Image (tube, rainbow, N blue to C red):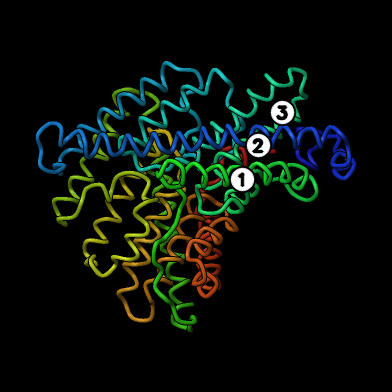
Amino acid sequence: MSAEPAGAPGAETPDPLTVIRTRGYAVLLVIVAALGVPVSAAAFGFLALVHELEDLTYEDLPHALGFASTPSWWPVPLLAVAGLLTALTIRHLPGTGGHRPAEGFVNAGAPTAAQLPGVALAALTSLGLGAVLGPEAPLIALGGGLAAYAARLLKPGIAPSANAVVAAAGSFAAVSALLGSPLLGAFLLMEASGLAGMMLGLVLVPGLLASGIGSLIFIGLGSWTGLGTYSLTLPHVPHTPDPGIAEFGWAVVLGVAAALAGTGVKRLSLSLQGWVEQRRVIATVAMGLTVGVLALLYAESTGRNASEVLYSGQSALGGLLSEDATYAVGSLLVLIVCKALAYAASLSAFRGGPIFPSMFLGAAGGLALSHLPGLNATSGFAMGIGAMCVAMLRLPMTSVLLATLLLGSEGVTVMPLVIVSVVVSYVLVLRFERPSAASTAPR
């Protein structure tokens, strides 16, 4: 199997059907199935460890120090420590802690065995101590790296192209249940990879196999340990009526607003990233302090919990929708501003993924606008998620699925609105995008 995408200049593209009929491809599927179990279990353990670190640092430690409840200022020193630990990991361990999240969702290939500890440690210190990032990017990197390393141990002579497929399948297995559906996780990686046609099927079949096995492992371990699956779910979704003309108008408004907000967050994070990389340790600590101060400002100005600004927002999405009536419009606006700035600061310096904070910001924005006439909360919630996701990820199909599958049966009703908001946001983001130096260079 060629490691180059179909249609690449000078690449010899094999016939995918011929490859699929070979004995070697069947052996590859067996290897993928066998590796899917330990890789999925490792991914589950990683998510459990992140969750335990969140509880330990944000709840147990303050109580152990004699505080009746977590003080509103607690995130400030906590995020400073996170910045220090993450910066030291990035500077001193191989692999710079994984890919830079400010550059978007990038499928950069599997890390080497030597880089895996740095990727894991940078993600743990970032996510477990409150940075506004999600676990999906580290999981994808760790799953791919572990699978590729294990495949080389099991079959030392494995071809680089086959090992790349195994690594991709490991990534599928690691992220299989995180987004609420193994199919959605597979679709995310499929769209991000840029593969197409039958060559996509060649890589997708092992990935889907690993994804299905991974989802079963997550469900089994969640039931056995009592920890749950760490999947993206909403406990209660209010009913939404069939969309009308007014809601299609709001879809355009939300698409424009998300494109502007997403472009602003991305440009700010990239600008900060350049400054951070010139003075890694001091600047990462400064970004951690910034996130902590923003959480403190939100808590003091609204009377709500500072943790709503911290972390990825994955577990808070359900409460945001079900408890929408308890949020004043002013509180939602302060939450959006503080979370967006904390998101940009985290993207610039920490390690993690960009998906869940973008979903949370879009959801909060849609709920804030639902207080105006002509827009119900569920529709605003879904359209905001889709429009903000595509503004940050540049993956339109994945953004539509993230916003609609999350809502269960109500997702079918709001899907036309989500599609409009995603398309508007996507087109505008591409128009706003600054051309790269390569694209503007004279030919």
Q: Nearer the viewer, residue 137 or 278?
A: 137
Q: Is the C-beta separation of discs 1 and 2 under 8 Å?
A: yes
Q: Position of residue 408 (x, y in %)?
A: 50, 66
Badge 2 crowding class, 10 Å Cα cut-off, few under 14, some 14 to 19, many 20 or more, is: many
User: Is 365 situated above or below 211?
Assistant: below
Q: Nearer the viewer, residue 315 or 115?
A: 315
Q: Could you say whether the residue bearing mark 1 is in a helix, strand or loop?
A: helix
**Residue, x 46% and y 48% (percent of image)?**
355
Q: Could you say whether the residue bearing mark 2 is in a helix, strand or loop?
A: helix
Q: Amino acid at mark 3?
A: Asn
**Disc 1 and disc 2: Cα gap in Å?**
9 Å
Q: Specify which label sits upstream in the sequence, 1 or 2.
A: 2
| Residue linked to disc 3 | 163
| Residue linked to disc 2 | 168
Q: Which mark is residue 189?
A: 1
**Disc 3 and disc 2: Cα gap in Å?**
9 Å
Q: Nearer the viewer, mark 1 or mark 3?
A: 3
**Residue, x 40% and y 66% (percent of image)?**
381
Left or right of 260 in this view: 429: right
